[in-house]
């Protein structure tokens, strides 16, 4: 028998001004199956905080603890409502209203998305599936997310310096081989300057090394094909600690990029990025 369930994604958004968030949990209710459940990320806190620049891990820990208590409180009310109903009547309505209250927009760094509806034979299994889809996979793409954050920061720098109009996202290369760059300056229909955001702060040194060398290889190939602009800058986020295997991998990648005539700067260094973007 299929049950109609409603679910919402738990989101963590520590910086209201950027509107950036990470999915950190799922809440699901299925009144006719008398089921209410939720799942919050309880490990990989470093991966959550890695999504946001300079975020103290305790901010997430405290927000998760407080939101978990709220879920426990509302869950208790819903379970008591389920215990007093035969699938109809005011108790069942109260359970749905309690879920609606949880999903109301709130001014908080942890909140739930607008509820969605899904049919399932097994609400508990569905909750686990939704968690894997919306939360676990989010952190599989942490690298992409971090590079997007750096790109947004660079875009803001270019706007502030009145240079954004000179740059656009496009492929560099030819039909046989090309790579996508988020900021490319074109003159006389030829790319002359390019800026690329690169995340090299992976928790695992091997993954850091692999991603870095992926771009070293691309740069070398474009350079050999005479398709790379004369001026290329990589705005990079590296490991916070300058010792150990992660930093060794980062240093090697940085050196190899520089050997390929790529300027490598800290992704937060506005002065160097703007100076590069403005140069003729």
Image (cartoon, rainbow, N blue to C red):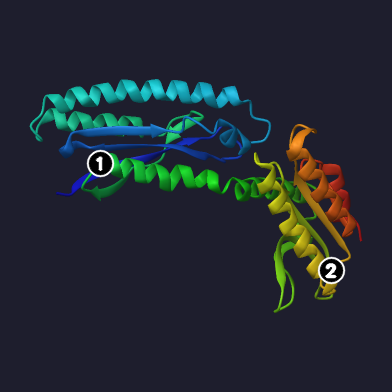
Rate crowding at label 1 as few (under 14), some (14 to 19) or many (20 or more) other CA atoms within 10 Å. Answer: many
The percent coordinates of residue 202 (x first, y second) are: 66, 42
All told, the count of numbered labels is 2
Residue at 81% over, 65% down: 220
The local secondary structure at tag 2 comes to helix
Residue 112's mark? none
The local secondary structure at tag 1 comes to helix
Compared with 124, 67 (above or below) is: above
Residue 123's mark? 1
Residue 184 visible (yes or no): no
Q: Are marks 1 and 2 in contact (CB under 8 Å)?
A: no
Distance from the alpha carbon under mark 1 to that under mark 2: 54 Å
Compared with 191, 60 (above or below) is: above
Give the position of the C terminus as an image quadrant.
bottom right
Q: Is residue 232 left or right of residue 2?
A: right
In the image shown, does 245 or 135 lie closer to the viewer? 245
In the image shown, does 268 or 252 lie closer to the viewer? 252
Residue furthest bottom in the image:
175
Q: Is residue 6 left or right of residue 145?
A: left
Residue at 74% over, 48% down: 154
Q: To which quarter of the image does residue 168 belong?
A: bottom right
Residue furthest right in the image:
280
Residue 82 visible (yes or no): yes
Residue at 17% over, 25% down: 81
Residue 223's mark? 2
Of pointers 1 and 2, the one earlier in the residue sequence:
1
Rate crowding at label 2 as few (under 14), some (14 to 19) or many (20 or more) other CA atoms within 10 Å. Answer: some
The percent coordinates of residue 53 (x first, y second) are: 67, 35
């Amino acid at each position: 028998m299929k049950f109609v369930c409603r679910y919402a994604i738990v989101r963590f958004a520590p910086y209201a001004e950027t509107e950036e968030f990470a999915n950190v949990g799922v809440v699901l209710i299925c009144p006719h199956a008398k089921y209410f459940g939720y799942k919050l990320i309880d490990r990989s806190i470093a991966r959550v905080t890695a999504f946001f620049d300079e975020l103290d891990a305790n901010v997430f820990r405290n927000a998760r603890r407080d939101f978990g208590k709220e879920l426990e409180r509302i869950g208790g009310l819903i379970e008591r409502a389920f215990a007093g109903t035969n699938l109809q009547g005011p108790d069942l309505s109260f359970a749905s209203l309690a879920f609606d209250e949880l999903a109301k927009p709130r001014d908080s760094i942890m909140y739930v998305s607008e509820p969605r509806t899904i049919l399932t034979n097994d609400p508990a299994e569905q909750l686990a599936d939704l968690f894997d889809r919306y939360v676990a996979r989010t952190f599989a793409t942490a690298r992409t997310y971090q590079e997007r954050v750096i790109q947004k920061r660079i875009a803001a720098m270019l706007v502030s310096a009145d240079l954004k109009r000179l740059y656009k996202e496009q492929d560099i290369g030819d039909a046989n081989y090309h790579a996508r760059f988020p900021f490319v300056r074109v003159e006389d229909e030829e790319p002359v300057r390019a800026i690329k955001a690169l995340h090299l702060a992976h928790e695992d040194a091997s993954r850091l090394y692999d991603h870095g060398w992926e771009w070293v290889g691309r740069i070398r190939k474009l350079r050999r094909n005479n398709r790379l602009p004369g001026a290329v800058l990589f705005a990079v986020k590296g490991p916070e600690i300058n010792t150990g295997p992660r930093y060794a991998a980062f240093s090697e990648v940085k050196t190899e990029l520089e050997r390929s005539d790529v300027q490598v700067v800290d992704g937060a260094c506005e002065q160097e990025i703007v100076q590069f973007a403005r140069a003729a």
